[in-house]
Amino acid sequence: MRRDVIHSLLVANRGEIACRIFRTCRDLGITTVAVYSDADADALHVREADLAVRLPGSAPADTYLRGDLVVAAALAAGADAVHPGYGFLSENAAFAAAVQDAGLTWVGPPVKAIELMASKTRAKELMAGAGVPLLAPVDPATAGPDDLPLLLKAASGGGGRGMRIVRELASLPGELLAAAAEAASAFGDGEVFAEPYVERGRHVEVQVMADAYDTVWALGTRDCSLQRRHQKVIEEAPAPGLEDALRTRLHDAAVAAARAVGYRGAGTVEFLVSAEGRPYFLEMNTRLQVEHPVTEAVFGVDLVALQLRVAEGEPLPAPVPPPASGHAVEARLYAEDPARDWQPQTGALLTLEVPDGPGLRLDTGYVGGDTIGVHYDPMLAKVIAHAPTRTEAVRLLAGALERARIHGPVTNRALLVRSLRHPDFAAARLDTGFYDRHLADLTTPGAGDPATAALAAALAEAVRAAGTPGPAPTRFGAWRNVPSQPQAKRYRSEPDGTEHEVAYRTPRTGTPEPYDAPGVRVLAATPDRVTLELDGLTRHFILRRDRDRLYVDTAGASYTFTALPRFTDPATQTDPGSLLAPMPGTVVRLAEGLAPGVAVEAGQPLIWLEAMKMEHRILAPASGTLTALHAAPGHQVEVGALLAVVQEDPDVTPVTASAPVPVPEENA
């Protein structure tokens, strides 16, 4: 067989997966080449690459999804091979063919295998012939009450696009149309199919690795049941609580699936496991998965290195995979607010520090000082823990996330910690409805002590104002501080909005002390660290300030505060019924017929914003009349921008709103 030694590799991707592939390349002595959009000009993957090629533009459709530009970039940089990462063009058969036609080595499966698995309907037909267990398809035209609930799915693509759960027959025709429109918009293919919806099913997958010499490894199972928007949040290997017979059946089915398409390289065969323990084939992802590190940890392998080895024409190092050891858990750290419909967040990432130590791994595309933009997926990093047992791995991961210092946009860090410590997760009672049932409890403000953290922030600010070098202190309008008298400061907790007012005074010793706070004593105070004794218990607070934001980290909790002026600024007030942009983004759509003077209904979608690969609906706050409209398709808006105004009037006949058009997710 032909052997193609790879000396220079272009990664047709961005962010953490590009950085992760570069890490293996450095270990192997392979020159690395990055591609980047204008929005990513200073991104970490560009800084870490040996060479980089610009793809003009910022939108994915103009840059990372332009296979012709990526191939041209590889040739211009003198690369031998192309690795697609995940998302973007990673499962695009035409791109894989174009890479090979250009004389480059494709670090991925054969084009034919990608084509066979690209359509879920065709893949299911092929898997049926290979004896892989399947859910029986349902013809929507003849579906009856006994077929409910149904799951509608796009035949092409993934990431939850084109997916609908139907529980009532009357809603089936409308949901079919909406799913088809969504699929066509996201993937250019409006084909949709229906199958039974499995309540409380588990998402279990098998990692496969195959070479050109008829060796196929089944590298254990992963459980990826904790999902939001049909995207994974926490993954682990091996999948807990499976009987040995079921594990064997899953391994055998995954190997059969790989052999049925002549697979080579790394791939993942995904299954839905019912509450009764019956497995059903979902799809095969013909690429590296986001969650591959948990398999690497358990089996002690480098899947990227194995991909490169197979692409070079080498056999796998042994006829069977190495033995598994221990348990690994991965958490995806997103810049998003789970309490507000998983709303993505943008802005300066001031600090990203995750504890390092035995059993811990961090895969990231960001470092402190980077900026999180609006164009791409909001995942910041993946934190992975490996330990001898599941209990130890979960504890290690939760502790690392809790001790991490993350300053800037809101993240899902607290949700991850609470999820890992939830009784259902600890007991491995896992299914894809976990967040549907528990999200409200998991996002309720915890039992921390924000008032004391706010006091620490005020004391640090007082030290700073007294002359310690650093950013200028917050000024409180016309209110004047007299140091010898009690001083007050107000802070708003973010993102829940709770306000705290704390008081202190600065005696002749020069060290500020709490005012009217019995049981609290200041042991030390600097602009970036405060130590307090609270009823005999010593606690340390580490602080960072960025303009009017203060970040306070202490054992077991982290807080973000906005310093508030003593008097309210009238300019910050908005008229009742104002619709403000919740994030920076692009206006992609307005409700049909929306214009000043039309009637709208409370809760009616009026405006769709696209930010970070997700679309978000702006709803009418009340029934009434639209009196102003400042948004139009294509407009770029900043957070807080006034989009429209609705004057409340419950006696109205609203316009009819069209369904939103989603965009494809970057990470599956």
Image (spheres, helix red, strand yellow):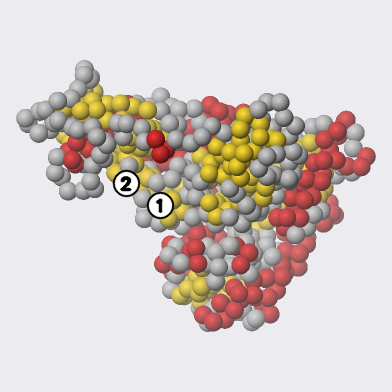
Q: Is residue 505 left or right of residue 348?
A: left
- For the point 70% across and 55% down, the residue is 186
For residue 562, which quarter of the picture?
Answer: top left
Q: CA distance from mark 1 to mark 2?
A: 10 Å
Can you identify the residue that label 1 sits on? 348
For marks 1 and 2, the one nearer the N-term is 1
Name the amino acid type tagged 1.
Ala
In contact (CB < 8 Å): disc 1 and disc 2: yes
Q: Which residue is mark 2?
A: 546
Q: Amino acid at mark 2?
A: Asp
Residue at image location 46% in from the left, 75% down from the top:
51
Q: Secondary structure at mark 1?
A: strand
Q: Position of residue 331 (x, y in %)?
A: 50, 44
Residue 654, relative to residue 255: is it above or below? above
Task: Tell me the residue at 82%/56% (across/down).
Answer: 122
Give the image location of residue 606, x and y in percent: 66, 41
Along the line of sight, which residue is nearer the eye, 299 or 278?
278
Look at 45% across and 42% down and name the residue there: 410
Quadrant in the picture for the N terminus: bottom right
> Residue 160 at what x, y percent from top left?
68, 47
Q: Residue furthest left?
A: 508
Total marks drawn? 2
On residue 30, the disc is: none
